[in-house]
Amino acid sequence: MSTTLRINGKSHQVDLPDDVPLLWVLRDEVGLTGTKYGCGVAACGACTVHIDGVAVRSCQMSLDDVDGEVTTIEGIGKPGSMAVVQQAWVDHQVAQCGYCQSGQIMQAASLLAENPAPSDNDIDEAMQGNLCRCGTYPRIRAAVHTAAKKMQEV
Amino acid sequence: MASIGKIARRSFLIGSAAIVGGVAFGAYYVSRPAPNPLKPGAGEAALNPFVLIDQQGVTLFAPRAEMGQGVKTTWAALIAEELDVELDAVRVLHGPAAQAYYNSAFMADMLPNRGYDVSDFQHSIGQVLGVLGKTLNLQGTGGSTSMKDGYSRMRQAGATARETLKQAAADRLGVARDQLKTANGRVQAPDGTSLSYSELAADAAKLDPIEVELRPSSEWRLLGKNQPRVDMVAKSTGTAEFGIDVRQKGMKFASLRRNPRLGAGMNGFDAEQALTMPGVEKVVDMGDGIAVVASNTWLAMQAAEMVDIDWQDAPYPPETDQVFAKIAEAFDDEPNSTMRDDGDVDALPDGATEITAEYQLPYLAHATMEPMNATALFEGDKLTVWCGNQMPTFTQWKCAAEAGLESEQVELHTTYLGGGFGRRVELDFSILATRLAKQMPGVPVQLTWSREEDMRHDFYRPGAIARMRGAIKDGAAVLMDGKVAAASPVAQVMDRIAGLPAGGPDKVHVEGFFNPPYAIPNFRMSGHLSDIQIPVGFWRSVGNSFNGFFVESFIDEMAHKAGTDPMEFRLALARKEWAPAAGVLDAVKQMSGWTGQTPDGVGRGVAMCYSFGTPVAEVIEVVDEDGSIRINKAWIACDMGLALDPETVKAQMFGGMAYGLSAACFGEITFADGEVEQSNFPDYDALRMHTMPQTEVQVLETQKHMGGAGEPGTPPAAPALANAIFDLTGKRARRLPLMHDFDIMV
């Protein structure tokens, strides 16, 4: 059936069964491949996107449950005009293989929108659903603190 | 373009030092040029296989798998250093599969020495032997070799291109070449005239190459300093293309199910129900399983689950206990190797106390964040494959064989790898995508493993058992006699990817077992190979990943038995054998403020392993939090000899440690009814933000030869943690993962 989605400020018409997860609609139908498949069971966070600004695991959200504006990693900033949190990732040279980082950044952006000055415990709490097999966690933590400071300066 | 061959020849000379070593014979043969894989179009000049210049600017080729270790950046920096271009002003590409991109450092590691003890002459032999990598057409990334491989070759490629561009400018301006300077991709004349490399490229391509001495390290602008990674912006904006992100016009999506009893076939299948599902286009017989082609990946995965398949039985014992009983049988056979045999281990030295222990480590999955995948397009006389892989030339060759084509008819595009850790050395995903594409001529198809298929069809780190016997006297180790039994990844990989038998002592099987840099007067270490047919492969640090645990756990047991502080016990053994090994121990001792005493509720452990040319010491601190054990802090010191990018080295060290700690806490692959029992992250977890320790890394540069960075952080992690837990609890971990015997915080 046909569904209309709002993604990164644009409308997209998709014709798919209701139960297809948003992750695969984004990746295989809309062509937004920045959002990653890691586990399909909400255990790794690689597929994290925002719905109305709140982080959700897009592998667990079926098409007919999407009720709001979807924002993906492509929607928060681009190489020439990065979001503050993305710039903090670059400043701290966070990524190694980089595969989980879209999800990490979307999770961090959601945390910062809710809590402009997160403590280490707040970061532990918010980020522990996002797995990184390269072990970039120390630099993620540093980048979240830097992004928080930069966002408060603005 | 007649000069390209000559330029290529120069760029493949392996450095005068190696030839001075007295083994110049055969140098002509091995230094004959490999064909330049870059085919310059109109207005482009490929000055050698690593430097291409066109009207848009300079492109550098870093034909090594970028799987997180930062190789793309540091490889490009080696060229850029001599070429006088800035990293943010050039494009860096992986390039095609090509013999010219052979790895010259793989072979040196095969020599039967301990690594840290090589003389200059042996080191030269290793370098000369390295060009065998070219005859074997061995383009690959692994074994922490990239910087050893590229260090001289890439600077030479940059320098030769620079001087040739200068000669082109000299000819045009009527000025002597030595009057010209280069910077920022331009040649500058004394009168202020400045020509861009783009303007000079076509003329330069007509000239004979010009060889020059490489610049001394004191003149380096980029090397030895932290460079912003060239992949960082793309990886922070979701624009980096991994294999799974490849999109081609008209592309179909597919997923697969293969026999969960690894290596066994299939009697038949019934796809009737799957074929009625929405979006499903076809179900293909893949030999030992099926693939479903659909309009998106999820539909393909769902449909694959609905195919009813009659599997054949496993070619190995079906239960974990039986698997380890079979591995232990290898102890009854003659050892495959005894690469260390010093003194006399049969007699117990007078007055010494004997100690024995047996350890057992599980099979492990790689669990890269990006599940296995490849995309292929078969067009009759041509095959195109897109994937992240660590072995381009072998991938090209095996895919050609699968498609019934010659290697030259296969175009391979190597993308970023969403983690490698050795898993993407394997060719299974590329071959299977080719097999599927061959059924769909003219249609590009992307084949993606579900996480469950990925975890249950890995080439695992082999399960391993060690039987250790040692003796202590006057607070020091006087004897170590060890035996390790495990299946051989080398034997299996040689067979799988090259169809070659492995022979002789299997060094990788005993790496980190026979060559710990410790002076123990009576020291014998043997390796026993098990021929059990569970698929095994290269897992970050390979043999060192289990041998490091065996040796460093047992050293700790000996230290405690001797009543000597474990740090001092190791330092005494290392100082007598190799100063850099003692140096990294001293460094972590200082960094951690090691006193040998820890308050109640805190435990500390240390381990030091030498692997891939680099000694690494780690101290881990654990704390008891309401009965649960949390890894609180970690201190790492490594001695790289030369660290070309210190921050990237640090990232590899703490990342390598995290990989080792994750496995130590939670990692195991077990078997029931011949099937792997784990299937996804809930039953194969890893360290996360709240369980990763605060970590400090120190990079030393005292040793003579350059060490590797990608793997050496991993081996000391598990033993340092187990030793810390012993300090905290008084209980020795003789098997992993720790979660079975200890309450590890999750």
Image (cartoon, coloured by chain):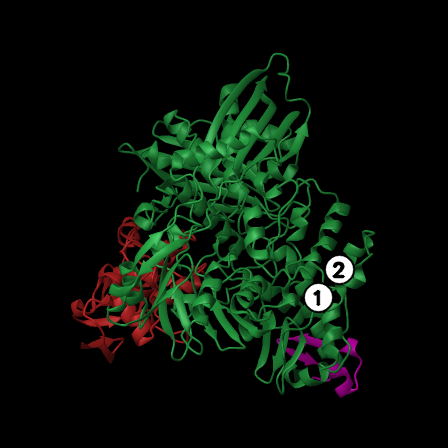
Looking at the rendered structure, whether the residues under marks 2 and 1 are on a common chain is answered as: yes
> Does residue B509 appear left or right of residue B628 in this picture?
right
Closer-to-camera residue (B75/B192): B75
Q: Which residue has dot 2 on it?
A: B15
The magenta segment is: B168-193
Please name the amino acid that badge 1 sits on.
Gln
Is the C terminus of chain B in the top left, top right, bottom left or bottom right quadrant?
Answer: top left
Closer-to-camera residue (B17/B266): B266
- Residue B84 appears in the rendering: yes
In the rendered image, the residue lying farthest to the top is B351
From the top left corner, tell me how far across and down residue B658 is, in percent. Answer: 43, 46
Residue at 44%, 26% in the rendered image: B597
- Residue B143 appears in the rendering: no
In the rendered image, the residue lying farthest to the front is B267
Q: Which residue has dot 1 on it?
A: B156
- When the figure is inspected, residue B441 is found, relative to residue A146, above or below; the finding is below
- When the figure is inspected, residue B132 is found, relative to residue B174, above or below; the finding is above
Closer-to-camera residue (B727/B373): B373
Tell me where residue B488 sits by quadrant: top right
Chain letter for the red part = A
Q: Are marks 2 and 1 in contact (CB under 8 Å)?
A: yes
Please state the chain letter of the residue tagged with numbered disc 1 in the rendered image: B
From the top left corner, tell me how far across and down residue B537 is, in percent. Answer: 51, 49
The residue tagged with tag 2: helix, strand or loop? loop
> Does residue A103 appear left or right of residue B316 in this picture?
left
Is the N terminus of chain B in the top left, top right, bottom left or bottom right quadrant?
Answer: bottom right
